[in-house]
Amino acid sequence: MKTFKYLLLITVLILAWTAFVGYGTFSGSLLRPITKGSSSASFIEATKERIENEFVGNMAMVLIENGAVSKDFFYSIDKAVNKHTVFQMASVSKWITSWGIFALVEEGKIKIDEPIDNYLTRWHLPESNFNNQEVTVRNLLSHTSGLVDGLGYGGFVDKDSVQSIEESLTKASDGFWSEGVAKVGNSPNSQYRYSGAGYTILQLIIEEVSGQLFEEYMAEAVFKPLKMAHSTFNWSDSLGSDLVTFYDSDSTIAPHYRYTALAAASLYTCTEDLSLFLKANFAHNSVLRPETIATMNKIHTAANQNTHGLGPMIFGRNDSGDFIVGHDGGNRPAINTAARINLKSKDGIIILETGNPGFATKLGDEWIFWKTGIADYVVIQRSKPFLLSLLVIGYLIIFFSSIIIIRVRNKKGLRGMN
């Protein structure tokens, strides 16, 4: 009977310790940020240590504190990088594209809850088992349209091979990770499913409604008013800007890929311009009204799904009122970008890099944890050795303490019998 009680006690203690470590992991209370310092300089020093252990071809990073740039950091293994060096942004492009859509909404030319077919003449969704008329602009912005394209665009080395928008939506020849067809395969509004084609459709809608090429409209409606002088959706060698050297993860120089899906994957910008864009999310600007931006930055997906606004991703919030929005991007060969802003504190980070397919995203997640204590998969994975050690040490203490207690009690029992 005593043995059973001891075993039960040990089991309860082990379960309690496991629950404690589990709670501390997911709440972030047992995790530690990559730097003990509280300054931007300390975060940059921690970043430099990371670069020493991982290959990064080039990188531009900006830290924003209380609405102003506090520190920047530039790195390259070859050609120097600075705040005007232009990077290809991959899916961060989607966030900027959403501003173009809402500029048309504010002009009364688009209603986000109307069927997208109301704005399309050059291409239409193919017939499906679902009601295509239920797909709205809001759905495309928040990835809740039911589209199952799985794009992910690979791009084209030869710019003469770039498809038209209509051709790409019908069958994207650079859709290497999927069938590449823009079609509805789930009931609209039923679930979150990330869709590159959804933003290519938005690109087409902007052209149809504005009567301009997408890149021309975005330059006039967004870049010029925000003074983003080094930004474009249509790269040309004659632009006079300094395009970064593209690196692959094996440290070789990689080709520059061109895209049909400009809105989804091919904004070109620099840290100076992107800093202006981040600030526009909490400061007065001449593109969108504050109430429009507030609507875009609300969660528009179900609570049990990936959280997404009407353009930006929602990276996290906590009980202190911190609310992180932004977007990440990744394209071949090894482009990775991240832009995040805390709407409460007006702190932000921008990381643009090539040569490493995940460095910017991981660093962005580390920044969120450092600033707010909001921990996600990246921080937990990085802390796994420490957490496992903590679990094992706790189990060993419970086990050996229990043995000592049992022996002491058994000795007392024997003495009592004598």
Image (tube, grey):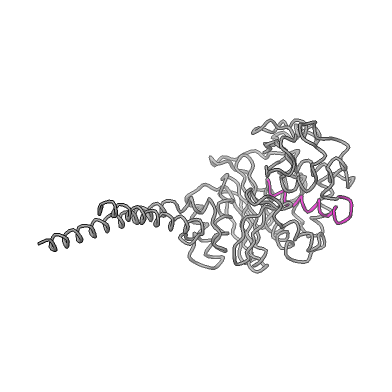
| Residue 117 can be seen in this image | yes
Magenta segment boundaries in residue numbering: 91-110
Q: Is residue 122 left or right of residue 261?
A: right
Judging depth in this view, the residue of 40 and 32 nearest the camera is 32
Task: Tell me the residue at 68%/46% (across/down).
Answer: 91
Mainly helix, strand or loop, the magenta region?
helix
> How many numbered circles does the render carry?
0
Residue 393's quadrant in the figure? bottom left
- 118 w.r.t. 75: above or below: above
The answer to which quarter of the image holds residue 166 is top right
The residue closer to the viewer here, 319 or 257, is 319
Q: Residue at the location (50% across, 67% down)? A: 37
Q: Residue at x 82, y 45 (%)?
A: 214
- Is 93 one of the magenta-colored residues? yes
Q: Looking at the rendering, in which quadrant would you find the C terminus?
A: bottom left
Residue 88 visible, this angle: no
Percent x, y of residue 120: 86, 40
**Corner quadrant of residue 182:** top right
> Percent position (x, y) of residue 282?
72, 64
**Identity of the residue drawn at 17% across and 60% down:** 413
| Left or right of 159 in this view: 207 | right
**What percent of the width, then of the height, locates residue 202?**
79, 44
The image position of residue 113, as x and y in percent, is 82, 49
Q: Who is closer to the viewer here, 303 or 10?
A: 10
